[in-house]
């Protein structure tokens, strides 16, 4: 009884013991709230697209959709920083290093906040240049620049929320971040409708609704962290950047952020290819792309579980349980991609009708869906291996592999295969081919690193 009490006292409030019990059950329970959180986060942008598409105009839809890849580029970097925080805190919690957890949490908050402010400034100052480089249509660029600049004002809040979510999920608490995001998501949708329908706003209205919701979610998660009673609590008086903690966070977080951003960079070239078609195709692609983001984020919950469970079990010195965490997370992610991809193929037209009333735009979007619906499950092999490598503290080499397999390969494809055929299928087939190539290299690297890994529970190091 005393041992159980001690175990509970060492566990973060509202958290989960990832080092014992059924992994199939615990990874699923851990991931389900994350799935809903990811879906709600996607709905921030999806509701923007849906509301302007249904209640404004298809040019407003295209304008908001034209910013999707830039939003993914910069928010992907912020999410990557959160991944670094998640892994490091999970490792230290697994090793019961309470003082180190405190230093990591306080350092990570400042680093993430500063990063969010810098990203916001870059987005605001470079919005028009970046959208012009994407060959955004002249009739769309004005609204796209306006939307992106307003949306960028919420980047610091997004950075803070991702930080808090990373800390809480590292301890197994994925339910409360979901609750906070539910509150913010409902407010976001209501404000979208109010600004567009009542106030007759368009791109600016949905962007304003998004940043208000982002600051609400950040405020809620910070209130939790300030009131906690465990080692993950934030104390204003202890906020400072601890050099050693910062080193570990940046070594894990920056490559993870670059890795996320790399996908967006590669996709910028794909967007350039899409922009070579007419505005109807651009709008249809913008609507269909919401399915990509939705399915990727559902699958992403299992990658977070993979890194968190591997991190805690690395801290606890249980190598067998670490590998099993990877296999189970991969299985869940593959199944999610296969099921959701199939549903999208069957219900694609109904899905697209959520974003537009134009039959031509729906037909254009279906060209994309018919290729991507079969492809999502394949990405699980690549992303699960990346998450597993990150869980054992390896982030640099997986990033290099992603740059070569997903960025360089896609750029070459766009300027060779797509340039020759110039059709939507010839453009989107590059996804599945790049995922297969990158997955093979990522799995090989993880297997090599995992075999050579030596556990030291007295001090978790990278």
Image: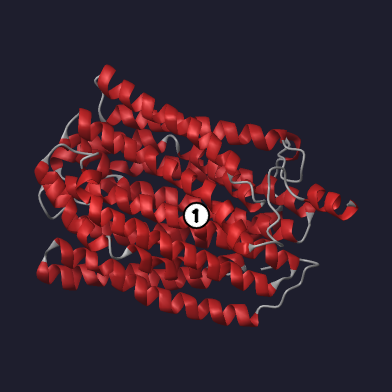
Identify the colour scheme used. Answer: secondary structure
Q: Position of residue 303 (x, y in %)?
A: 51, 60
The residue at 43%/41% (across/down) is 40
Q: Left of 175 or right of it: where is 371?
A: left
Q: Left of 131 or right of it: where is 261?
A: right
Which quadrant of the figure has residue 414? Answer: bottom left
Position of 425 relative to 132 (above/below): below
Q: Is residue 312 visible?
A: yes
Q: Quadrant of the C terminus?
A: bottom right
Secondary element type, mark 1:
helix
Which quadrant of the figure has residue 124? Answer: top left
Badge 1, how many Cα within 10 Å: few under 14, some, many 20+? Answer: many
Judging depth in this view, the residue of 204 and 164 nearest the camera is 164
Residue of label 1: 301
Judging depth in this view, the residue of 208 and 429 nearest the camera is 429
Position of 292 relative to 395 (above/below): above
Position of 324 relative to 262 (above/below): below
The residue at 23%/68% (across/down) is 429
């Amino acid at each position: 009884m005393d041992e159980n009490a001690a175990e509970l006292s060492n566990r973060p409030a509202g958290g989960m013991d990832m080092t014992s019990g059924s992994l199939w059950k615990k990874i699923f329970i851990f991931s389900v709230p994350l799935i809903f959180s990811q879906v709600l986060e996607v709905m921030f942008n999806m509701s923007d697209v849906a509301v302007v598409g249904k209640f404004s105009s298809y040019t407003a839809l295209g304008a908001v959709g034209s910013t999707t890849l830039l939003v993914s580029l910069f928010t992907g970097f912020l999410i990557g920083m959160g991944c670094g925080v998640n892994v490091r805190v999970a490792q230290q919690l697994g090793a019961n290093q309470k003082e180190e957890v405190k230093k990591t949490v306080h350092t990570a908050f400042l680093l993430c906040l500063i990063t969010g402010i810098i990203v916001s400034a870059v987005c605001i100052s470079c919005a028009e240049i970046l959208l012009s480089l994407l060959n955004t249509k002249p009739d769309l660029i004005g609204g796209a620049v306006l939307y992106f600049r307003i949306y960028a004002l919420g980047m610091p809040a997004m950075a803070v929320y991702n930080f808090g979510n990373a800390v809480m999920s590292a301890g197994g608490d994925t339910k409360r971040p979901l609750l906070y995001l539910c509150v913010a998501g409902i407010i976001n949708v209501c404000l979208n409708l109010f600004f567009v329908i009542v106030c007759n706003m368009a791109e600016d209205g949905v962007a304003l609704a998004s940043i208000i919701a982002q600051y609400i979610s950040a405020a809620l998660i910070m209130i939790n962290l300030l009131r906690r009673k465990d080692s993950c609590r934030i104390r204003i008086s202890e906020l400072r950047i601890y050099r050693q903690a910062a080193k570990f966070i940046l070594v894990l977080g920056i490559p993870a952020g670059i890795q996320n951003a790399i996908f967006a960079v590669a996709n910028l070239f794909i967007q350039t290819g899409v922009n070579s078609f007419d505005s109807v195709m651009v709008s249809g692609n913008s609507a269909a792309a919401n399915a990509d983001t939705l399915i990727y984020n559902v699958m992403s919950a299992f990658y977070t579980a993979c890194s968190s469970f591997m991190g805690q079990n690395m801290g606890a010195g249980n190598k067998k349980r670490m590998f099993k965490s990877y296999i189970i997370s991969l299985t869940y992610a593959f199944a999610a991609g296969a099921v959701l991809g199939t549903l999208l193929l069957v219900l694609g037209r109904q899905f697209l009708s959520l974003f537009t009333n134009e039959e031509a735009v729906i037909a254009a979007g279906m060209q994309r869906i018919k290729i991507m619906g079969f492809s999502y499950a394949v990405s699980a092999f690549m992303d699960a291996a990346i998450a597993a490598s990150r869980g054992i503290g390896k982030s640099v080499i997986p990033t290099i592999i992603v740059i070569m397999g997903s960025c360089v390969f896609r750029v070459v494809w766009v300027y060779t295969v797509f340039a020759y055929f110039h059709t939507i299928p010839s453009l989107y087939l590059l996804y599945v081919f790049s995922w297969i190539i990158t997955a093979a290299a990522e799995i090989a690297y993880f297997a090599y690193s995992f075999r050579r890994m030596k556990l030291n529970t007295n001090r978790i190091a990278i």
